[in-house]
Image (cartoon, grey):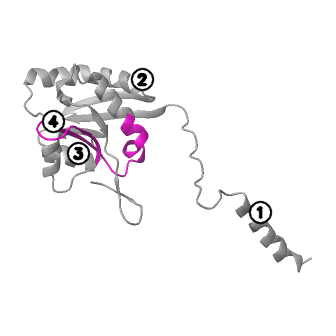
């Protein structure tokens, strides 16, 4: 029986490899399971050129509007909070340290950051362009599913909320390096 044990092991391995995808084919992606559930989502917006009244209105009205718009996109956040950043650098630091989940800044402020967090969304180019950033190690928030849901949610509420600017948001797909690993812009 001992002589046949290695032969059975090799046969088992051959059977396992035969069950995998054919050469050149990728395994199908597993279906996304139900809504993306978040216990909380903290969002920070930039002061920009907005008035105190516009910022106060955003802090007061935006949490519920964003929560509802995200739910329409399959992201269920138990609570959403909105704060106003004191500066682009402070906002970026809050994202890097995990105190803020997602932050929205004018694109020129994002581009001027020395060590920016992961770019998640962009809106337009040139004057008035906006950027949204998240912590790169938060896989739920840095992924395509959340990015597309957040872009759709922000686009749905931005006409009532000037903190997001006037342009449509879209997922800022990470660039690929030579090894095929995503890079944070």
| Residue 157: percent from left, percent from top | 28, 22
Element type where label 4 sits in the image: loop
Picture quadrant of residue 9? bottom right
Quarter holding the N terminus is bottom right
Q: Give the mark, 2 or 4, whose residue is nearer the N terminus.
A: 4
Label 1: which residue? Answer: 15
Residue underneath mark 3: 94
Q: Is residue 75 left or right of residue 101?
A: right
> Is 39 a magenta residue?
no
Q: Which residues are magenta?
A: 119-148
Secondary structure at badge 1 equals helix
Q: CA distance from mark 1 to mark 2?
A: 44 Å
The residue mark sitting in front, 3 or 1, is 1
Residue 32 appears in the rendering? yes
Answer with mark 1 or mark 4, whichever residue precedes in sequence: 1
Which residue does the numbered mark 4 point to in the structure image? 46
Image-quadrant location for residue 140: top left
Query: In x, y percent, where is residue 83?
Result: 21, 32
According to the picture, the residue beneath numbered tag 2 turns out to be 72
The location of residue 65, given as percent across then percent down, is 31, 21
Q: Is residue 145 left or right of residue 61?
A: right
- Label 4 Cα neighbours within 10 Å, binned few <14 / some 14-19 / many ≥20: many
Q: Tell me the distance, in whole angstroms, between the alpha carbons under discs 3 and 2.
A: 28 Å
């Amino acid at each position: 029986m001992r002589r046949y044990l290695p032969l059975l092991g090799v046969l088992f391995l051959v059977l396992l490899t035969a069950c995998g995808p054919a050469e050149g084919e990728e395994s199908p992606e597993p279906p996304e399971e139900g809504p993306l559930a978040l216990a909380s989502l903290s969002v920070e917006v930039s002061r920009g050129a907005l008035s105190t009244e516009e910022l106060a209105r955003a802090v007061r009205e935006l949490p519920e509007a964003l929560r509802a718009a995200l739910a329409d996109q399959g992201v269920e956040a138990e609570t959403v909070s909105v704060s106003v950043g004191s500066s682009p650098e402070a906002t970026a630091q809050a994202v890097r340290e995990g105190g803020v989940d997602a932050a929205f800044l004018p694109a020129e402020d994002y581009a001027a950051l020395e060590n920016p967090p992961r770019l998640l969304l962009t809106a337009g180019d040139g004057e008035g362009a906006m950027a949204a950033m998240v912590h790169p190690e938060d896989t739920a928030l840095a992924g395509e599913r959340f990015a597309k849901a957040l872009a759709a949610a922000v686009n749905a509420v931005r006409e009532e909320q000037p903190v997001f600017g006037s342009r449509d948001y879209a997922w800022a797909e990470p660039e690929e390096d030579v090894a095929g690993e995503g890079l944070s812009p």
